[in-house]
Image (cartoon, rainbow, N blue to C red):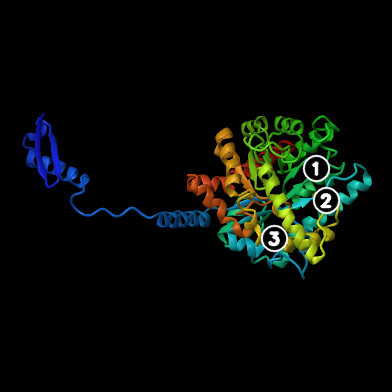
Amino acid sequence: MNLIGFGLGDCPLLVIICEATMKKTVLNSWKWTAAVVAISVLAACGGGAAEEPAPTAEEAEAALVERARGIHERVITLDTHNDISVSNFTPERNYTTDLGNQVNLPKMEEGGLDVTWLVVYTGQGDLDEAGYAAAYENAIAKFDAIHWLTEEAAPDRIELAYTSDDVRRIDAEGKKVAMIAIENAYPVGLDLDNIRDFAERGGRYMSLSHNGHSQFADSNTGERDDVWLHGGLSDLGRAAIIEMNKWGIMIDLSHPAKTSNLETIELSRAPVMASHSSARAVNDVSRNLDDEELQALAANGGVVQTVAFSSYVNSAKNDAHRAAMRVIEEEIAAEIGFELVERSAIRTMSDDERNAYFGQMMEVRQRAGARAGEVADTAPPVDVADFADHIDYMVNLIGLQHVGISSDFDGGGGVHGWNNAAETFNITLELVRRGYTEEEIGMLWSGNLLRVLDEVQLVAQEMQAEEG
């Protein structure tokens, strides 16, 4: 090996030439090789054409936002939990206009939210014939409201999907997508044939309980007083799992107790899901799933839809911010003659009363929001970064393919930066900031959930075929 040294200006060069390359070759001679190496080193020393200046912080941010917007437009964004009130599904008042709530068609269009799971929610009532009848009536009214929106009020803007293929087709046609969720199986009553009926009406996931023990399963709320009804699932709950598997309804783990969830996972032939839950290891509340539940869900092939509900994301931070904002809200409420009530009182309201209350509460919070800067330094709100911390934790624990996204909008959900459907892009932007790829973001937003839905419906086909 020979060393040849020479210099150009302030850039001395040392070119290392192998003897083998000094022989005649098809490239003419060793001198050609030395010239190539010299030019390469010269460029590294700053010779030749001037380098492009490094982008400024503002330019780098603009490029990142532009990339995130491209990803946001290309992936299918899907939110698995948006509550509804039937009073917002009438010819005079409906989702074709911005009602001031968190999810409606104008807000979905503005924020690029492609798929909304509209929730047939029923609060837990008495476990008797009258309670079941009232719950069934409530559920059917909400099923009918969703069908009315998609089939009569705005079929040119939103369509009901029953399968993953429906979602992709409707999205490709440029329309928004509605899917139906059932929060609390209480309306099924004691007649398991209602499970098939709910599936035929479009229900694609259902939780076996809500806040309170149902006829099917213990609720997470049993942790408050350590009072339980079944010790997990009831016999009726075990039978309901078979029916849900058979008719293609995903089983939702977001409200039942841990004992109920672990038994459900063990019994289900199909993958399960949690429609709106975050990580209990990050924020210790009973509505979040602990590591054992998350790992069992992943082993089952399921998916957990991380929820942007401030008090589930970061309770301490949320409590401090809410206390500070409550002072401002009380001042504003007093000015307009509006009485603020606790969340427990809201749960006992009728749909009309609750809708009227939230309408006035929205006005109070909008006015208070204009003064949020007064507490930003001392008590900042829970934000999209706090929310994404839960995504990161669960991705690292159980794998990206088992994690998704939900808001619980119009049911108490929302964080600073994603407080309504119009702000949906901010979630994609935060994921890009954290280094998630376009493929991974697509999986988080919809791919993982749609995979589970497909597998659930494949199991249903197999079970129906087994019965002939």
Tag shown at residue 211: 1
Q: Tag 3: residue type? A: Ala
Q: Which residue is mark 2?
A: 347
At a point 83% along the width and 31% down the height, the residue shown is 226
Task: Check disc 1: other Cα within 10 Å, few if <14, some if 14-19, many if 20+.
Answer: some
- The reply to whether dot 3 and dot 2 touch (C-beta < 8 Å) is no
C-alpha gap between disc 3 and disc 2: 23 Å
Image quadrant holding the C terminus, namely top right
Q: Which residue is mark 3?
A: 368
Image quadrant holding the N terminus, namely top left
What SS does tag 1 mark? loop
- The reply to whether dot 2 and dot 1 touch (C-beta < 8 Å) is yes
Query: How many circles with numbers are drawn on the protein?
Result: 3
Task: Give percent across and percent down for residue 75.
Answer: 53, 53
C-alpha gap between disc 3 and disc 1: 30 Å
Give the mark nearest the N terminus, 3 or 1.
Answer: 1
Q: Tag 2: residue type? A: Arg
At a point 75% along the width and 42% down the height, the residue shown is 207
Camera-near label (3 vs 1) is 3
Q: With 466 as the anchor, is 448 left or right in this view?
A: left
Give the mark nearest the N terminus, 3 or 2.
Answer: 2
Q: Is residue 356 above or below residue 3?
A: below
C-alpha gap between disc 2 and disc 1: 10 Å
Tag shown at residue 296: none
Q: Tag 1: residue type? A: Asn
Q: Nearer the viewer, residue 51 or 400?
A: 51
At a point 46% along the width and 57% down the height, the residue shown is 66
